[in-house]
Amino acid sequence: MYSSTCVLREMWLWHPPVGVWIGVLGLLGVLVPLIREKVGPPEKAMWTAVMFALLLLEIKSVYQDRNEHDNEQRESRERSEQNFQAIANGLRSAISQGAEQFNATMRRSDAIIGGVTDSIKTQTGGDSFAYIAFTPEPGGVSLGGLPISSAAQFLVSITSRGKYPLRETHCTLMDDERRLQAVLEYNKLPSGNWMDAITSADTPYYIPYLHPQSKEAPTGEVKVLGWYPFGAKDANDMTVGCSSLNGFWTERLHLRKINGKWHQSLSILGPTLAQSLHPFVYSDSDFPEGKAIAEKDWPRPKPKAH
């Protein structure tokens, strides 16, 4: 059972629609004069109190109705915000899930592309290259009792650089000293093709396959290409043009004879643009000019002053 306090609270909270108490007040204002022609002071005081009570009840109904309307609007906004928040959360979740799926797809795609790219580089050679080196050997070198070299000359070898193997590598050694001799010989009897006369001093090399650098061969694979005689002078400069499936590169090889011993220094330009900007340089530790001579092979233009 409700207590008297609850009953009074419910009676206070209840109110008719706005305008009912004003309607009752207006109706009494018309009927009272018609029913009661003569109204004494006590009765006037009573009717006045009734009218004030009706007016207060109407004011109460107006404020309660406004509060109820405001509460309904607030609850409606809260429900709308909750619905919008739920929709936004759903959209964020869908976008986040879509982004994760997209990133996963891109990672798989990158892995596939990376694998394809690495596979292509493995077939073509990527940014790998090789350089030709000259090692002076004394005469009378033999292997297993059989003479290999009767005269002192250079042992020519090629060494791979990079993590990708090289296939179908062709190199042409152009000896400046031999070319000059060929030109002098051609000038004595200038007949035939002068270009053929000059290139007749060149030495071609063909290397079908070179293994890349690895843990087993950290300095690369070294293959012997043959022998090359010492020059007539104590200094010689050579150019080696190489090509493989990954492109072209050029080597400058410098030989110097100091105190009866030959030393070398070399530099490589290419095959990639990055390697063209930063050539590979190798020099014997006791080469007179060190790496300085090789660094002069590919001078870079100085930036213009602004």
Image (tube, rainbow, N blue to C red):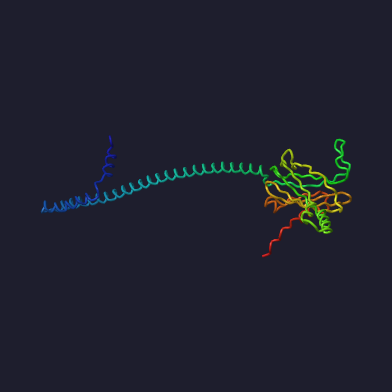
The residue positioned 81% from the left and 44% from the top of the image is: 226
Q: Give the left or right position of residue 243, taking residue 24 as reference.
A: right
Q: Nearer the viewer, residue 70 or 262?
A: 262
Q: Residue furthest bottom?
A: 306
Q: Nearer the viewer, residue 304 or 47?
A: 304
What is the x, y in percent for residue 204?
Answer: 77, 48
What is the x, y in percent for residue 266?
Answer: 78, 51
Q: Nearer the viewer, residue 106 or 25?
A: 106
Q: Quadrant of residue 164?
A: top right
Q: Residue furthest top?
A: 1
Dividing the image into 4 quarters, which one contains the N terminus? top left
What is the x, y in percent for residue 273?
Answer: 67, 52
Query: Is residue 135 depicted above or below 3 in this figure?
Result: below
Q: Give the left or right position of residue 98, taking residue 192 as reference.
A: left
What is the x, y in percent for residue 46?
Answer: 18, 50
The residue positioned 77% from the left and 42% from the top of the image is: 223
Dividing the image into 4 quarters, which one contains the C terminus? bottom right
Q: Give the left or right position of residue 27, taking residue 164 as reference.
A: left
Q: Give the left or right position of residue 44, taking residue 93 as reference.
A: left
Q: Quadrant of residue 227?
A: top right
